[in-house]
């Protein structure tokens, strides 16, 4: 294998790893704190990419504004999602909240199909240039995605140290006792759901200039996010980051060499890993609902 | 089985026997589809009884279907033997996967189930041996002697026999020591632990029994459609099954799957005129049901109709006597 091809595959793996890290940490945060399995997150990711595409091409805004727009709009939609349907269902249990997220995802997906039609949203590259290091060419647009992903993960790390972040962790441990300590459970829950959705929207906005926005991009992302959660350990942000890059790189190289069998091989490795380390690679897992 | 269950069982199957003559071939086909979907949902409520939600229904269904398809087309094995082998394969693979997943609790089981179902479909679509995305066609119909199960009524009776077998085994289990242990686990993990029940072991037995019946159903589906392809075993099947259970009422593990499946089959027929909006409307109906009648139709029945019946007949179940 030439060095150029190797670098290309590695960079693609790192890009997907950054995306998986954001989606998976949003997912695991929502599951750990609010105790809902948000099946609609793939659709939020897709919608974030379309918002970014629309703001850049239709409104002619610069890319950073578009990225901010996809973050904020998905945050607001997530809050609407929480207060519209989830809040009243939380008492009914896991099965009902899960089916609510499935239905909401269907509505978003079908609505997007009716609105945008079945065509990909190809938007212009943000940065045209490329680094040339000893004959190996690395496009700057792809590095931007990795950088953006790392920045947002660091920001999330510091967000979890703030008052609202620690309230989230407290509510994840025990909602009743957190309430006695003066934590408003509803506030924590809606912020967590909205942050989880906003992370997905931001990931979609980051990926939109590199790979075009399409209606089907949200369908498999949740499965990759589940891989990341299984490897990294539930509720561990650093574990999610490392595991996401591992899964992204493994998938990228796997697709090069074994084609369609890549996911199957990754799942085999994860099954063996879980057999020996049931809590994931790193971190203390958040308590799970129902047990 | 208790006496009431035996009576209901007999009456139900006596009513179902003349269906092909009464309703005609088109309705018979619909009834076959409803029964198939209902049996899938029965496997879901069966596992729900011990507090686990399964998302891998389509996966094990596919394992059964593909086993029958491969064995009958490539190796000339008879349908009945391939049905049994498919069930055993689903149990064996399921044991290897669930021995990791079940001790980690309900959410981990659910997540692993979702991934497993997708991986199984991926294996079938990636491999040339299983026919890729096109699947396997020209499966020979099942036969006994010279009689072939190819007409709709004969396939209907085959499905009804399968349903009778599944219901019979499940009802026997529910009234045995194992079934009571499952109910205790579903009622509360701490309660079950305090009774000395080995939770992982009993949940494993429950899930593997479900796997076996799902694989049998897969074989039946292969015999019914005479071809299998990865598209017919997608995640959407598992989700439809859960919506059916939701509509019926999730705490009625025997009757709710069939009521829900029948309703879920007829809703899209009425929504056909709305065209591309139909799936959005179905999703809105689901949200409406979750918000306003979370226990489903039979839950409404329990809440509004049963008290009236008790009051009229003056026969109250234990614990429900008026003060």
Image: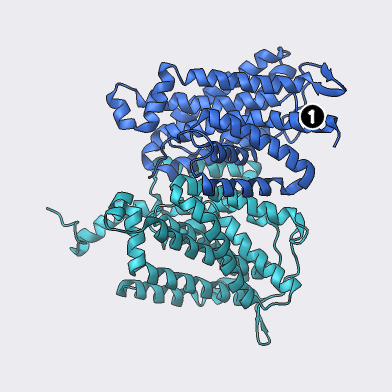
What residue occupies the far bottom of the structure in this picture?
Answer: B145
Q: Image check: B190 left or right of B245?
A: left
Of B31 and B21, nearer the camera is: B31
Of A73 and B176, nearer the camera is: B176
Q: Position of residue B48 (x, y in %)?
A: 42, 55
Q: Is residue A193 above or below residue B47?
A: above
From the rendered image, report the letter of the chain displayed in blue: A
Q: Image check: B53 left or right of B132?
A: left
Q: Image check: B24 left or right of B171?
A: right
> Quarter holding the C terminus of chain A?
top left
Numbered disc 1: what chain?
A: A
Residue at x 67% of width, y 19% of height: A147
Circle 1 SS class:
helix
Of A240 and A74, nearer the camera is: A240
Residue at x 32% of width, y 63% of height: B180
Q: Is residue B174 visible?
A: yes
Residue at x 75% of width, y 31% of height: A10
Q: Is residue B84 above or below residue B246?
A: below
Q: Position of residue B198 (x, y in %)?
A: 36, 58
Q: Image check: B281 left or right of B9?
A: right
Q: Would you call the spot at circle 1 few (<14 residues within 10 Å), some (14-19), or many (20 or more)?
A: some
Q: Is residue B37 above or below residue A77?
A: below
Q: Position of residue B301 (x, y in %)?
A: 34, 55
From the rendered image, report the letter of the chain displayed in cyan: B
* Residue corresponding to mark 1: A7
Image colouring: by chain
């Amino acid at each position: 294998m030439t060095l150029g091809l190797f670098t290309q595959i590695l960079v693609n793996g790192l890009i997907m790893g950054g995306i998986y890290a954001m989606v998976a940490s949003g997912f695991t945060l929502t599951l750990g704190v609010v105790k809902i399995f948000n099946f609609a997150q793939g659709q939020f990711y897709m919608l974030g990419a379309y918002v970014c595409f629309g703001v850049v091409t239709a409104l002619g805004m610069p890319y950073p504004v578009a990225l901010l727009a996809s973050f904020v709009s998905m945050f607001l939609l997530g809050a609407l999602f929480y207060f519209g349907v989830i809040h009243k269902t939380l008492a009914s249990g896991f099965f009902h909240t899960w089916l609510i997220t499935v239905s909401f995802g269907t509505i978003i997906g079908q609505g997007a199909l009716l609105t945008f039609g079945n065509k990909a949203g190809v938007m212009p590259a943000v940065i045209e240039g490329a680094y040339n290091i000893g004959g190996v060419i690395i496009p700057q647009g792809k590095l931007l995605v990795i950088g953006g992903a790392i920045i947002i993960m660091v920001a999330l790390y510091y967000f979890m140290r703030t008052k609202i972040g620690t309230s989230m962790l407290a509510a994840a441990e025990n909602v009743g006792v957190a309430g006695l300590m003066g934590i408003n459970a509803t506030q924590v829950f809606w912020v967590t759901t909205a942050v989880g959705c906003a992370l997905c929207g931001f990931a979609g906005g980051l990926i939109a200039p590199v790979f075009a926005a399409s209606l089907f991009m949200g369908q498999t992302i949740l499965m990759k996010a589940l891989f990341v959660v299984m490897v990294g350990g539930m509720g561990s942000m650093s574990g999610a980051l490392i595991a996401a890059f591992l899964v992204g790189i493994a998938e990228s190289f796997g697709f090069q060499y074994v084609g369609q069998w890549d996911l199957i091989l990754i799942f085999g490795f994860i099954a063996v890993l879980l057999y020996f380390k049931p809590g994931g690679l790193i971190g203390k897992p958040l308590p799970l609902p129902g047990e | 089985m208790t006496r009431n269950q035996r009576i209901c069982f007999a009456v139900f199957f006596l009513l179902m026997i003349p269906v092909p003559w009464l309703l005609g071939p088109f309705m018979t086909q619909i009834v076959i589809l409803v029964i198939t979907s209902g049996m899938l949902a029965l496997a879901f409520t069966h596992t729900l009884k011990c507090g686990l939600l399964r998302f891998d229904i389509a996966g094990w269904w596919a394992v059964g279907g593909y086993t029958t398809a491969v064995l009958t087309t490539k190796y000339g094995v008879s349908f009945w033997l391939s049905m049994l082998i498919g069930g055993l394969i689903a149990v064996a693979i399921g044991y290897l996967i669930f021995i990791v997943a079940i001790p980690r609790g309900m959410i981990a089981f659910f997540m692993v189930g979702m991934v497993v179902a997708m991986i199984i479909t991926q294996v079938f679509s990636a491999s040339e041996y299983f026919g890729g995305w096109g699947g396997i066609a020209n499966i020979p119909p099942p036969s006994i002697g010279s009689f072939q199960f190819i007409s709709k009524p004969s396939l209907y009776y085959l499905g009804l026999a399968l349903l009778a077998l599944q219901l019979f085994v499940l009802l026997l289990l529910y009234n045995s020591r194992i079934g009571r242990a499952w109910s205790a686990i579903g009622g509360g993990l701490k309660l079950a632990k305090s009774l000395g029940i080995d939770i992982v072991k009993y949940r494993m037995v429950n899930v593997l029994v479900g796997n076996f019946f799902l694989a049998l159903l897969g074989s039946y589906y292969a015999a019914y459609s005479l071809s299998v392809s990865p598209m017919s075993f997608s995640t959407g099947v598992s989700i439809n099954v859960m919506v059916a259970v939701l509509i019926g009422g999730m705490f009625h593990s025997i009757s709710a799957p069939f009521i829900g499946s029948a309703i879920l089959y007829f809703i899209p027929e009425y929504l056909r005129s709305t065209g591309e909006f139909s799936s959005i409307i179905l999703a809105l109906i689901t949200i409406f049901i979750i918000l306003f009648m979370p226990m489903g139709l039979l839950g409404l029945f329990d809440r509004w109709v049963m008290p009236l019946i008790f009051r009229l007949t003056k026969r109250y179940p234990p614990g429900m006597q008026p003060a």
